[in-house]
Image: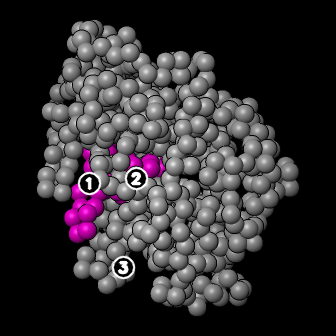
Amino acid sequence: MNAKPFLVIPVVSVFCLGLLAGCASPKHPIAQNPKPPVSLEPPPAVVKTNRLVIHADQPGAEISRNIYGQFSEHLGHCIYGGLWVGEDSPIPNTRGIRNDVVAALKKIQVPVVRWPGGCFADEYHWMDGIGTPTNRPSMINTTWGGVVENNHFGTHEFMDFCGQIGAAPYICGNVGSGTVQEMMEWVEYLTSDADSPMANLRRQNGREQPWKVPYFAVGNESWGCGGNMTAEFCADNFSRYNTFVKDYPGNHIYRVASGGLESDYHWTEVLMKQNADGLKHGGQAMNGYSLHYYTLPTSNWSHKGSATKFDEAEWFNTFRHTLVMDELVTKHSAIMDKYDPQKKVGLIVDEWGAWYDVEPGTNPGFLYQQNTLRDALVAGVTLNIFNNHADRVKMANIAQMINVLQAMILTDNEKMTVTPSYWVFEMDTVHHDATLLPSELQSVDYAFGDKTIPAVSASASRDRAGKIHVTLCNLNPNQSIEVPCELQGAKAQKISGRVLTAPEMSAHNTFDQPDNVKPTEFNAFKVTDNGFVTTLPAKSVVVLEVN
Ligand code: AHR
Protein backbone atom coordinates (compact mmCIF):
# COMPACT_ATOMS: atom_id res chain seq x y z
CA MET A 1 0.00 0.00 0.00
CA ASN A 2 2.78 2.38 0.89
CA ALA A 3 4.47 3.98 -2.07
CA LYS A 4 5.35 7.41 -0.76
CA PRO A 5 8.09 8.49 1.58
CA PHE A 6 7.08 9.03 5.15
CA LEU A 7 5.43 12.42 5.45
CA VAL A 8 4.68 12.85 9.11
CA ILE A 9 7.53 15.20 10.00
CA PRO A 10 5.69 18.50 9.54
CA VAL A 11 2.90 17.26 11.75
CA VAL A 12 5.28 16.16 14.43
CA SER A 13 6.92 19.53 14.42
CA VAL A 14 3.54 21.16 14.91
CA PHE A 15 2.98 18.84 17.83
CA CYS A 16 6.35 19.90 19.22
CA LEU A 17 5.19 23.45 19.17
CA GLY A 18 1.98 22.30 20.70
CA LEU A 19 3.63 20.68 23.62
CA LEU A 20 5.98 23.54 24.17
CA ALA A 21 3.16 26.00 24.07
CA GLY A 22 1.07 23.70 26.20
CA CYS A 23 3.62 23.28 28.91
CA ALA A 24 5.44 26.53 28.49
CA SER A 25 3.26 28.50 30.81
CA PRO A 26 5.63 29.91 33.42
CA LYS A 27 3.17 28.87 36.10
CA HIS A 28 3.31 25.24 35.20
CA PRO A 29 5.83 23.22 37.21
CA ILE A 30 6.58 20.85 34.34
CA ALA A 31 7.15 23.76 31.98
CA GLN A 32 9.73 25.27 34.26
CA ASN A 33 11.68 22.08 34.28
CA PRO A 34 10.93 19.99 31.23
CA LYS A 35 13.60 17.43 32.05
CA PRO A 36 13.44 16.98 35.79
CA PRO A 37 16.61 15.63 37.38
CA VAL A 38 15.96 12.14 38.56
CA SER A 39 17.61 10.11 41.26
CA LEU A 40 18.08 6.40 41.27
CA GLU A 41 17.98 6.37 45.06
CA PRO A 42 15.01 4.44 46.50
CA PRO A 43 12.07 6.73 47.15
CA PRO A 44 11.47 7.90 50.69
CA ALA A 45 9.19 5.78 52.88
CA VAL A 46 5.53 6.50 52.30
CA VAL A 47 3.76 8.12 55.24
CA LYS A 48 0.24 6.82 55.76
CA THR A 49 -1.81 9.97 55.83
CA ASN A 50 -4.33 9.22 53.14
CA ARG A 51 -7.96 10.08 53.51
CA LEU A 52 -10.83 9.81 51.06
CA VAL A 53 -14.17 11.35 51.97
CA ILE A 54 -17.07 10.44 49.67
CA HIS A 55 -20.13 12.62 49.96
CA ALA A 56 -22.80 10.07 49.15
CA ASP A 57 -25.38 12.56 50.43
CA GLN A 58 -24.37 15.21 47.85
CA PRO A 59 -25.05 13.93 44.35
CA GLY A 60 -23.07 15.65 41.62
CA ALA A 61 -23.43 15.69 37.84
CA GLU A 62 -24.27 12.67 35.76
CA ILE A 63 -21.10 11.02 34.43
CA SER A 64 -21.85 10.85 30.72
CA ARG A 65 -21.14 7.42 29.31
CA ASN A 66 -19.54 9.33 26.43
CA ILE A 67 -16.53 10.06 28.65
CA TYR A 68 -15.64 6.45 27.85
CA GLY A 69 -15.66 7.10 24.09
CA GLN A 70 -13.11 6.06 21.48
CA PHE A 71 -11.38 7.58 18.48
CA SER A 72 -10.69 5.73 15.24
CA GLU A 73 -8.79 7.48 12.48
CA HIS A 74 -7.64 6.43 9.03
CA LEU A 75 -4.13 6.06 10.42
CA GLY A 76 -1.87 3.03 10.28
CA HIS A 77 -3.83 -0.10 11.04
CA CYS A 78 -6.62 1.38 13.08
CA ILE A 79 -9.19 0.99 10.30
CA TYR A 80 -7.53 -1.25 7.71
CA GLY A 81 -6.55 -4.51 9.37
CA GLY A 82 -7.74 -3.28 12.75
CA LEU A 83 -11.47 -3.16 12.41
CA TRP A 84 -11.93 -3.58 8.64
CA VAL A 85 -10.67 -6.60 6.71
CA GLY A 86 -13.19 -6.68 3.86
CA GLU A 87 -15.83 -9.28 3.15
CA ASP A 88 -13.49 -11.60 1.25
CA SER A 89 -11.01 -11.89 4.11
CA PRO A 90 -10.41 -15.30 5.72
CA ILE A 91 -10.59 -13.43 9.06
CA PRO A 92 -14.15 -13.93 10.36
CA ASN A 93 -16.09 -10.78 9.64
CA THR A 94 -19.56 -9.37 9.19
CA ARG A 95 -19.82 -7.24 6.05
CA GLY A 96 -16.05 -6.71 6.22
CA ILE A 97 -15.87 -5.78 9.93
CA ARG A 98 -13.86 -8.11 12.19
CA ASN A 99 -16.05 -10.24 14.47
CA ASP A 100 -13.38 -10.63 17.18
CA VAL A 101 -12.93 -6.87 17.43
CA VAL A 102 -16.67 -6.24 17.53
CA ALA A 103 -17.10 -8.80 20.34
CA ALA A 104 -14.29 -7.23 22.40
CA LEU A 105 -15.60 -3.70 21.93
CA LYS A 106 -19.15 -4.71 22.88
CA LYS A 107 -17.78 -5.94 26.20
CA ILE A 108 -16.54 -2.48 27.14
CA GLN A 109 -19.81 -0.88 25.99
CA VAL A 110 -18.16 1.71 23.76
CA PRO A 111 -20.66 4.57 23.85
CA VAL A 112 -19.39 6.73 20.99
CA VAL A 113 -16.77 6.55 18.22
CA ARG A 114 -15.10 9.57 16.62
CA TRP A 115 -14.20 9.18 12.92
CA PRO A 116 -12.56 9.65 10.34
CA GLY A 117 -9.86 11.79 12.06
CA GLY A 118 -7.89 13.57 13.44
CA CYS A 119 -5.73 15.26 10.88
CA PHE A 120 -7.14 12.88 8.29
CA ALA A 121 -10.60 14.42 8.65
CA ASP A 122 -9.49 17.71 7.15
CA GLU A 123 -8.29 16.05 3.98
CA TYR A 124 -11.12 13.52 3.69
CA HIS A 125 -13.75 13.93 0.99
CA TRP A 126 -16.69 11.80 1.98
CA MET A 127 -18.06 11.35 -1.54
CA ASP A 128 -14.93 9.34 -2.38
CA GLY A 129 -16.01 6.80 0.24
CA ILE A 130 -19.48 5.85 -1.03
CA GLY A 131 -20.77 3.62 -3.83
CA THR A 132 -19.28 0.40 -5.17
CA PRO A 133 -15.95 0.02 -3.33
CA THR A 134 -13.92 -0.87 -6.41
CA ASN A 135 -15.16 2.30 -8.14
CA ARG A 136 -14.14 4.57 -5.30
CA PRO A 137 -11.21 6.89 -6.06
CA SER A 138 -8.05 6.59 -4.01
CA MET A 139 -6.25 9.38 -2.22
CA ILE A 140 -2.94 9.87 -0.47
CA ASN A 141 -3.07 9.97 3.28
CA THR A 142 -0.50 12.75 3.43
CA THR A 143 -0.36 13.03 7.20
CA TRP A 144 -0.03 9.38 8.11
CA GLY A 145 2.76 7.69 6.22
CA GLY A 146 1.83 8.91 2.76
CA VAL A 147 0.00 5.65 2.08
CA VAL A 148 -2.66 5.31 -0.58
CA GLU A 149 -6.12 5.20 0.96
CA ASN A 150 -8.51 3.21 -1.22
CA ASN A 151 -11.64 4.52 0.49
CA HIS A 152 -13.10 1.02 0.92
CA PHE A 153 -14.05 1.98 4.44
CA GLY A 154 -16.40 4.96 4.11
CA THR A 155 -19.62 6.34 5.49
CA HIS A 156 -21.74 3.17 5.12
CA GLU A 157 -19.04 0.96 6.60
CA PHE A 158 -18.49 3.30 9.56
CA MET A 159 -22.20 3.51 10.32
CA ASP A 160 -22.43 -0.27 10.06
CA PHE A 161 -19.49 -0.61 12.48
CA CYS A 162 -21.17 1.72 14.99
CA GLY A 163 -24.36 -0.34 14.69
CA GLN A 164 -22.49 -3.60 15.23
CA ILE A 165 -20.80 -2.41 18.45
CA GLY A 166 -23.81 -0.39 19.65
CA ALA A 167 -21.96 2.96 19.72
CA ALA A 168 -23.12 6.41 18.63
CA PRO A 169 -21.27 7.93 15.66
CA TYR A 170 -19.32 11.15 16.16
CA ILE A 171 -18.33 12.38 12.72
CA CYS A 172 -15.63 14.96 12.16
CA GLY A 173 -16.27 17.17 9.13
CA ASN A 174 -13.67 18.63 6.80
CA VAL A 175 -13.22 22.36 7.34
CA GLY A 176 -9.53 22.57 6.40
CA SER A 177 -9.76 21.46 2.76
CA GLY A 178 -13.49 20.93 2.30
CA THR A 179 -16.28 23.26 1.32
CA VAL A 180 -19.34 24.33 3.22
CA GLN A 181 -21.44 22.64 0.53
CA GLU A 182 -19.56 19.37 0.96
CA MET A 183 -20.16 19.37 4.69
CA MET A 184 -23.80 20.34 4.26
CA GLU A 185 -24.36 17.54 1.76
CA TRP A 186 -22.73 14.95 4.00
CA VAL A 187 -25.17 15.79 6.78
CA GLU A 188 -28.06 15.60 4.29
CA TYR A 189 -26.79 12.26 2.97
CA LEU A 190 -26.54 10.85 6.47
CA THR A 191 -29.66 12.17 8.13
CA SER A 192 -32.32 13.38 5.70
CA ASP A 193 -35.40 11.34 4.87
CA ALA A 194 -36.56 13.77 2.18
CA ASP A 195 -36.94 13.08 -1.52
CA SER A 196 -33.75 15.08 -1.98
CA PRO A 197 -30.56 14.63 -4.03
CA MET A 198 -28.31 13.46 -1.20
CA ALA A 199 -30.92 11.29 0.52
CA ASN A 200 -31.67 9.67 -2.83
CA LEU A 201 -27.97 9.08 -3.46
CA ARG A 202 -27.82 7.29 -0.12
CA ARG A 203 -30.82 5.17 -1.15
CA GLN A 204 -29.10 4.32 -4.44
CA ASN A 205 -26.15 3.14 -2.37
CA GLY A 206 -28.34 0.72 -0.48
CA ARG A 207 -29.45 2.57 2.63
CA GLU A 208 -33.13 3.50 2.61
CA GLN A 209 -33.51 4.99 6.09
CA PRO A 210 -31.49 7.95 7.28
CA TRP A 211 -29.08 7.28 10.11
CA LYS A 212 -29.03 9.08 13.41
CA VAL A 213 -25.92 11.23 13.77
CA PRO A 214 -25.99 12.73 17.24
CA TYR A 215 -22.48 14.26 17.26
CA PHE A 216 -20.65 16.22 14.59
CA ALA A 217 -17.34 18.10 14.82
CA VAL A 218 -16.84 21.14 12.64
CA GLY A 219 -13.16 20.51 11.88
CA ASN A 220 -10.24 19.14 13.88
CA GLU A 221 -7.27 20.98 15.37
CA SER A 222 -7.98 24.08 13.29
CA TRP A 223 -4.87 25.65 14.87
CA GLY A 224 -2.64 23.09 13.10
CA CYS A 225 -3.23 20.26 10.64
CA GLY A 226 -6.87 21.37 10.29
CA GLY A 227 -5.95 24.65 8.56
CA ASN A 228 -3.43 26.61 10.65
CA MET A 229 -6.05 29.16 11.64
CA THR A 230 -6.08 31.84 14.29
CA ALA A 231 -8.67 31.59 17.03
CA GLU A 232 -10.59 34.48 15.51
CA PHE A 233 -10.64 32.91 12.04
CA CYS A 234 -11.65 29.57 13.51
CA ALA A 235 -14.50 31.17 15.43
CA ASP A 236 -15.85 32.78 12.23
CA ASN A 237 -15.30 29.61 10.26
CA PHE A 238 -17.13 27.60 12.87
CA SER A 239 -20.11 29.97 12.69
CA ARG A 240 -20.14 29.75 8.91
CA TYR A 241 -19.80 26.00 8.48
CA ASN A 242 -22.00 25.23 11.43
CA THR A 243 -24.84 27.29 9.99
CA PHE A 244 -25.14 24.68 7.25
CA VAL A 245 -24.91 21.63 9.48
CA LYS A 246 -28.65 21.11 9.45
CA ASP A 247 -30.93 19.29 11.81
CA TYR A 248 -33.18 17.30 9.48
CA PRO A 249 -36.46 15.99 10.95
CA GLY A 250 -35.81 13.22 13.42
CA ASN A 251 -32.14 14.03 13.99
CA HIS A 252 -30.59 16.52 16.34
CA ILE A 253 -26.89 17.24 16.05
CA TYR A 254 -24.61 18.20 18.92
CA ARG A 255 -22.00 20.44 17.26
CA VAL A 256 -18.41 20.52 18.42
CA ALA A 257 -15.95 23.31 17.63
CA SER A 258 -12.20 22.83 17.41
CA GLY A 259 -10.26 23.96 20.45
CA GLY A 260 -6.77 25.43 20.29
CA LEU A 261 -3.50 23.99 21.51
CA GLU A 262 -3.85 22.29 24.83
CA SER A 263 -3.25 25.37 27.00
CA ASP A 264 -4.28 28.04 24.52
CA TYR A 265 -6.73 29.78 26.83
CA HIS A 266 -7.10 32.75 24.47
CA TRP A 267 -8.60 30.36 21.89
CA THR A 268 -11.15 29.21 24.43
CA GLU A 269 -12.06 32.82 25.27
CA VAL A 270 -12.55 33.68 21.61
CA LEU A 271 -14.59 30.61 20.70
CA MET A 272 -16.75 30.82 23.80
CA LYS A 273 -17.35 34.54 23.46
CA GLN A 274 -18.45 34.25 19.86
CA ASN A 275 -20.22 30.92 19.78
CA ALA A 276 -21.30 29.76 23.22
CA ASP A 277 -24.70 31.27 22.67
CA GLY A 278 -25.07 30.77 18.95
CA LEU A 279 -28.79 31.42 18.98
CA LYS A 280 -28.17 34.94 20.19
CA HIS A 281 -26.16 35.53 17.03
CA GLY A 282 -28.81 34.02 14.81
CA GLY A 283 -26.81 30.86 14.15
CA GLN A 284 -26.73 27.34 15.54
CA ALA A 285 -25.30 26.86 18.96
CA MET A 286 -21.86 25.45 19.66
CA ASN A 287 -22.75 22.54 21.91
CA GLY A 288 -19.25 21.26 22.54
CA TYR A 289 -15.74 22.66 22.59
CA SER A 290 -12.86 20.31 21.93
CA LEU A 291 -9.64 19.84 23.92
CA HIS A 292 -6.75 17.54 22.93
CA TYR A 293 -3.95 16.55 25.26
CA TYR A 294 -1.38 13.75 24.98
CA THR A 295 0.90 12.35 27.69
CA LEU A 296 4.58 12.10 26.71
CA PRO A 297 6.93 10.61 29.28
CA THR A 298 9.86 12.81 28.22
CA SER A 299 8.12 16.00 26.95
CA ASN A 300 10.25 15.62 23.83
CA TRP A 301 8.44 14.88 20.58
CA SER A 302 11.65 13.64 18.94
CA HIS A 303 12.34 11.10 21.71
CA LYS A 304 9.09 10.42 23.46
CA GLY A 305 10.30 7.24 25.12
CA SER A 306 9.64 3.57 24.54
CA ALA A 307 6.25 2.03 25.28
CA THR A 308 7.81 -0.99 26.98
CA LYS A 309 11.43 -0.25 27.83
CA PHE A 310 11.40 2.40 30.50
CA ASP A 311 12.72 2.95 33.98
CA GLU A 312 11.07 4.43 37.02
CA ALA A 313 12.09 7.95 35.99
CA GLU A 314 9.99 7.62 32.82
CA TRP A 315 7.19 5.96 34.74
CA PHE A 316 7.12 8.88 37.18
CA ASN A 317 7.35 11.54 34.49
CA THR A 318 4.56 9.89 32.54
CA PHE A 319 2.24 10.51 35.46
CA ARG A 320 3.50 14.04 36.05
CA HIS A 321 2.35 14.74 32.52
CA THR A 322 -0.86 12.77 32.76
CA LEU A 323 -1.92 14.78 35.81
CA VAL A 324 -1.65 17.99 33.77
CA MET A 325 -5.03 17.01 32.32
CA ASP A 326 -6.67 18.10 35.57
CA GLU A 327 -5.14 21.56 35.30
CA LEU A 328 -6.17 21.88 31.65
CA VAL A 329 -9.75 20.83 32.28
CA THR A 330 -10.00 23.11 35.32
CA LYS A 331 -8.63 26.18 33.52
CA HIS A 332 -10.58 25.72 30.28
CA SER A 333 -13.72 25.09 32.33
CA ALA A 334 -13.18 28.31 34.30
CA ILE A 335 -13.15 30.30 31.03
CA MET A 336 -16.18 28.43 29.77
CA ASP A 337 -17.97 29.25 33.04
CA LYS A 338 -17.57 32.97 32.30
CA TYR A 339 -19.57 32.73 29.08
CA ASP A 340 -21.70 29.74 29.96
CA PRO A 341 -22.36 29.64 33.70
CA GLN A 342 -25.12 27.10 33.21
CA LYS A 343 -22.63 24.71 31.65
CA LYS A 344 -24.63 24.11 28.48
CA VAL A 345 -21.49 23.76 26.37
CA GLY A 346 -19.60 20.54 26.96
CA LEU A 347 -15.84 20.26 27.11
CA ILE A 348 -15.15 17.43 24.66
CA VAL A 349 -11.73 15.88 25.19
CA ASP A 350 -11.85 14.09 21.87
CA GLU A 351 -8.17 13.09 21.80
CA TRP A 352 -6.16 11.99 24.81
CA GLY A 353 -3.78 9.26 25.84
CA ALA A 354 -0.13 8.26 26.03
CA TRP A 355 2.09 8.81 22.99
CA TYR A 356 5.42 6.95 22.79
CA ASP A 357 8.00 6.22 20.10
CA VAL A 358 6.65 3.67 17.63
CA GLU A 359 7.59 0.03 18.11
CA PRO A 360 10.98 -0.61 16.50
CA GLY A 361 10.67 -1.77 12.91
CA THR A 362 7.18 -0.36 12.36
CA ASN A 363 6.23 2.47 10.02
CA PRO A 364 6.84 5.74 11.94
CA GLY A 365 3.73 7.20 10.32
CA PHE A 366 1.51 4.46 11.74
CA LEU A 367 1.94 5.32 15.43
CA TYR A 368 1.88 1.68 16.53
CA GLN A 369 2.89 1.24 20.17
CA GLN A 370 2.59 -1.48 22.80
CA ASN A 371 0.44 -0.88 25.84
CA THR A 372 1.54 -1.78 29.37
CA LEU A 373 0.37 -1.58 32.93
CA ARG A 374 1.64 2.02 32.83
CA ASP A 375 -0.99 2.80 30.19
CA ALA A 376 -3.67 1.22 32.35
CA LEU A 377 -2.78 3.69 35.07
CA VAL A 378 -2.72 6.58 32.59
CA ALA A 379 -6.26 5.57 31.66
CA GLY A 380 -7.37 5.06 35.27
CA VAL A 381 -6.09 8.45 36.42
CA THR A 382 -7.41 10.33 33.38
CA LEU A 383 -10.86 8.77 33.58
CA ASN A 384 -10.97 9.71 37.28
CA ILE A 385 -10.20 13.31 36.28
CA PHE A 386 -13.01 13.29 33.71
CA ASN A 387 -15.46 11.71 36.17
CA ASN A 388 -14.63 14.37 38.75
CA HIS A 389 -15.29 17.10 36.13
CA ALA A 390 -18.48 15.50 34.85
CA ASP A 391 -20.33 18.80 35.15
CA ARG A 392 -18.31 20.12 32.19
CA VAL A 393 -16.65 17.16 30.47
CA LYS A 394 -19.41 15.62 28.40
CA MET A 395 -17.39 13.40 26.09
CA ALA A 396 -13.84 12.08 25.77
CA ASN A 397 -12.32 9.85 23.10
CA ILE A 398 -9.12 7.98 23.82
CA ALA A 399 -6.62 7.98 20.97
CA GLN A 400 -7.02 5.52 19.47
CA MET A 401 -9.20 2.43 19.40
CA ILE A 402 -7.06 -0.17 17.57
CA ASN A 403 -3.33 -0.43 16.73
CA VAL A 404 -2.66 3.30 17.13
CA LEU A 405 -1.28 5.14 20.19
CA GLN A 406 -2.94 4.08 23.47
CA ALA A 407 -5.05 1.38 21.90
CA MET A 408 -7.72 -0.86 23.37
CA ILE A 409 -6.93 -3.63 20.91
CA LEU A 410 -3.87 -4.77 18.99
CA THR A 411 -4.12 -6.96 15.90
CA ASP A 412 -1.71 -8.72 13.59
CA ASN A 413 -3.55 -10.28 10.67
CA GLU A 414 -5.84 -12.88 12.27
CA LYS A 415 -4.36 -12.41 15.78
CA MET A 416 -5.86 -10.06 18.30
CA THR A 417 -5.26 -9.13 21.92
CA VAL A 418 -6.82 -6.62 24.26
CA THR A 419 -4.52 -4.26 26.19
CA PRO A 420 -4.24 -3.26 29.86
CA SER A 421 -5.97 0.04 28.92
CA TYR A 422 -8.90 -1.97 27.57
CA TRP A 423 -9.36 -3.58 30.97
CA VAL A 424 -9.60 -0.21 32.70
CA PHE A 425 -12.39 0.78 30.34
CA GLU A 426 -14.06 -2.55 31.09
CA MET A 427 -13.74 -2.12 34.88
CA ASP A 428 -14.99 1.47 34.68
CA THR A 429 -18.20 0.67 32.77
CA VAL A 430 -19.82 0.90 36.21
CA HIS A 431 -19.53 4.69 36.00
CA HIS A 432 -21.41 5.03 32.69
CA ASP A 433 -24.32 7.43 33.25
CA ALA A 434 -23.94 7.10 37.02
CA THR A 435 -24.20 10.06 39.35
CA LEU A 436 -20.88 11.49 40.44
CA LEU A 437 -20.40 11.49 44.21
CA PRO A 438 -18.24 14.46 45.12
CA SER A 439 -15.17 13.35 47.01
CA GLU A 440 -12.17 14.86 48.75
CA LEU A 441 -8.90 13.04 48.57
CA GLN A 442 -5.86 13.64 50.68
CA SER A 443 -3.08 11.56 49.18
CA VAL A 444 0.40 10.74 50.27
CA ASP A 445 3.11 11.77 47.85
CA TYR A 446 4.85 9.52 45.42
CA ALA A 447 8.35 11.00 45.36
CA PHE A 448 11.02 10.48 42.77
CA GLY A 449 14.21 12.50 42.73
CA ASP A 450 13.26 15.89 44.07
CA LYS A 451 9.77 15.79 42.60
CA THR A 452 6.50 14.53 44.01
CA ILE A 453 3.04 13.78 42.71
CA PRO A 454 0.00 12.52 44.61
CA ALA A 455 0.24 8.74 44.75
CA VAL A 456 -3.49 8.10 44.79
CA SER A 457 -6.26 9.13 42.43
CA ALA A 458 -9.95 8.43 43.00
CA SER A 459 -13.48 9.02 41.75
CA ALA A 460 -16.82 7.70 42.99
CA SER A 461 -20.34 7.40 41.62
CA ARG A 462 -23.74 5.91 42.39
CA ASP A 463 -25.42 3.91 39.66
CA ARG A 464 -29.12 3.72 38.92
CA ALA A 465 -29.49 0.63 41.10
CA GLY A 466 -28.06 2.58 44.05
CA LYS A 467 -24.67 0.86 44.13
CA ILE A 468 -21.62 2.99 44.85
CA HIS A 469 -18.48 2.41 42.81
CA VAL A 470 -15.07 3.83 43.57
CA THR A 471 -12.09 3.72 41.20
CA LEU A 472 -8.75 4.12 42.96
CA CYS A 473 -5.30 4.20 41.37
CA ASN A 474 -1.98 3.79 43.16
CA LEU A 475 0.78 5.33 41.02
CA ASN A 476 3.59 4.21 43.31
CA PRO A 477 5.23 1.21 41.65
CA ASN A 478 7.05 0.17 44.84
CA GLN A 479 4.64 0.41 47.73
CA SER A 480 1.12 -0.57 48.58
CA ILE A 481 -0.94 2.21 50.11
CA GLU A 482 -3.68 2.08 52.69
CA VAL A 483 -6.61 4.42 52.02
CA PRO A 484 -9.20 4.95 54.76
CA CYS A 485 -12.47 6.06 53.21
CA GLU A 486 -15.22 7.91 55.01
CA LEU A 487 -18.62 7.46 53.41
CA GLN A 488 -20.89 10.35 54.32
CA GLY A 489 -24.60 9.72 53.97
CA ALA A 490 -24.30 5.99 53.23
CA LYS A 491 -23.33 2.86 55.10
CA ALA A 492 -21.00 0.27 53.66
CA GLN A 493 -22.38 -3.19 54.28
CA LYS A 494 -20.96 -5.36 51.61
CA ILE A 495 -17.96 -4.56 49.42
CA SER A 496 -16.51 -6.38 46.46
CA GLY A 497 -13.69 -5.39 44.19
CA ARG A 498 -11.47 -6.01 41.17
CA VAL A 499 -7.87 -5.04 40.64
CA LEU A 500 -5.60 -4.61 37.65
CA THR A 501 -1.92 -4.93 38.45
CA ALA A 502 1.16 -6.98 37.52
CA PRO A 503 4.63 -7.68 38.91
CA GLU A 504 6.38 -5.45 36.35
CA MET A 505 5.71 -1.80 35.44
CA SER A 506 6.03 -2.75 31.78
CA ALA A 507 3.84 -5.87 31.92
CA HIS A 508 1.77 -6.16 28.76
CA ASN A 509 -0.31 -8.56 26.73
CA THR A 510 0.99 -10.18 23.56
CA PHE A 511 -0.67 -12.34 20.92
CA ASP A 512 0.98 -15.38 22.53
CA GLN A 513 0.35 -14.29 26.12
CA PRO A 514 -2.87 -12.31 26.01
CA ASP A 515 -3.67 -12.73 29.72
CA ASN A 516 -0.52 -11.27 31.28
CA VAL A 517 -2.46 -8.24 32.48
CA LYS A 518 -6.13 -8.68 33.25
CA PRO A 519 -8.34 -7.90 36.22
CA THR A 520 -8.62 -10.27 39.15
CA GLU A 521 -10.77 -10.40 42.24
CA PHE A 522 -9.71 -7.99 44.99
CA ASN A 523 -10.45 -8.26 48.68
CA ALA A 524 -7.94 -6.06 50.51
CA PHE A 525 -10.59 -3.95 52.21
CA LYS A 526 -12.67 -3.99 55.34
CA VAL A 527 -15.79 -2.22 56.48
CA THR A 528 -15.24 0.38 59.22
CA ASP A 529 -17.65 2.36 61.42
CA ASN A 530 -17.84 5.24 58.99
CA GLY A 531 -16.96 3.61 55.68
CA PHE A 532 -14.17 1.26 54.74
CA VAL A 533 -10.43 0.98 54.49
CA THR A 534 -8.62 -0.54 51.55
CA THR A 535 -5.01 -1.32 50.74
CA LEU A 536 -4.11 -0.59 47.14
CA PRO A 537 -1.32 -2.76 45.75
CA ALA A 538 1.63 -0.94 44.21
CA LYS A 539 0.92 0.23 40.61
CA SER A 540 -2.70 -0.78 40.51
CA VAL A 541 -6.17 0.25 39.44
CA VAL A 542 -8.87 -0.94 41.84
CA VAL A 543 -12.63 -0.68 41.38
CA LEU A 544 -14.76 -1.27 44.47
CA GLU A 545 -18.49 -1.85 44.60
CA VAL A 546 -20.06 -0.74 47.87
CA ASN A 547 -23.55 -1.88 48.78
O1 AHR B 1 -4.25 10.98 17.16
C1 AHR B 1 -3.24 11.32 16.27
C2 AHR B 1 -3.29 12.78 15.83
O2 AHR B 1 -3.05 13.62 16.90
C3 AHR B 1 -4.59 13.28 15.27
O3 AHR B 1 -4.76 12.97 13.92
C4 AHR B 1 -4.50 14.75 15.46
O4 AHR B 1 -5.74 15.37 15.54
C5 AHR B 1 -3.72 14.85 16.73
O5 AHR B 1 -2.88 15.89 16.84
Q: Mark 1 highlights which residue?
A: 418
Q: Quadrant of residue 409?
A: bottom left
Regarding residue 142, the answer to whether it shows in the image is: yes
State how far apart marks 2 and 3 are (Cα). 25 Å
For residue 197, side relative to residue 419 (left or right): right
Mark 3: which secondary structure?
A: loop
- Quadrant, the C terminus: top left
Which residue type does callout 1 highlight? Val
Q: Mark 3 highlights which residue?
A: 86
Crowding at mark 1 (Cα within 10 Å: few <14, some 14-19, many 20+): many
Regarding residue 533, the answer to whether it shows in the image is: no
Q: Mark 2 highlights which residue?
A: 364
* Magenta span: 395-424
Residue 200 in the image, given as x and y percentages of width and height: 65, 88
Crowding at mark 2 (Cα within 10 Å: few <14, some 14-19, many 20+): some
Please state which of the two labelled residues, at mark 2 or mark 3, is closer to the viewer. 2
